[in-house]
Amino acid sequence: MTGAYGIKGWVRIKPYSPDADAMLHAKTWWLDKPVLRDVDMMQAKMHGEDVVAQLMGVADRDGAEALKGATVQIRRSHFPPLDDNEFYWVDLVGLAVENLEGEALGAVADLMDNGAHPILRVVAPVASPDQKPNEWLIPFVDQFVKTVDQAGRKITVDWGLDY
């Protein structure tokens, strides 16, 4: 959550996807602040690129501001169905990434959207805690992402170790 919306306890959420249909229709959300708990969603609507929502038990702006930084989770059953070669970001996080030469780059730590397309943030494992990990930002487009094998938990990319 990014903060409050108005003075009547509505919250503002930045969705991971421009298609926030699942958030708008799920009646129960799980929030991880202050602890993981379920909350009834009373109303939600799009406001620009954000979702604004009224949650049960959040009656004023102070209550909404207290939730700033919380992550919203919803049941997988509320996610819209995917077409072939479409993926939910949550399913890509943690997958191993290797290049066409078979060299391991690391694992998907998260994804971000630059407006044109998603970007994989791939982080290599480190040998010691004081070592800074190698990190690659790989555009999630056909030119660079060659295969996504969810069952095999691996993504193959056309990306060199020296990029």
Image (cartoon, grey):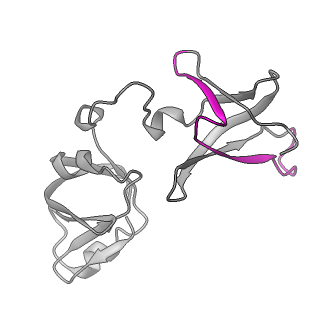
Q: Is residue 144 magenta?
A: yes
Which of 18 and 10 lies nearest the eye of the viewer?
A: 18
Is 25 magenta? The answer is no
Residue 89 relative to residue 109: left or right: left
Locate the N terminus and report the quarter of the image it occupies.
bottom left
Q: Position of residue 151 (x, y in %)?
A: 52, 16
Residue numbers of the magenta segment: 127-151
Q: Is residue 86 above or below residue 1?
A: above
Q: Is residue 95 left or right of residue 122?
A: left
Q: Position of residue 155 (x, y in %)?
A: 63, 27
Name the residue located 18 percent from the left edge and 62 percent from the top edge.
Answer: 45
75 w.r.t. 100: above or below: below
Residue 75 percent location from the top left of the image: 27, 37
In this orientation, which residue lies closer to the viewer: 125 or 59? 125
Residue sitting farthest toward the top: 152
Q: Quadrant of residue 102?
A: top right
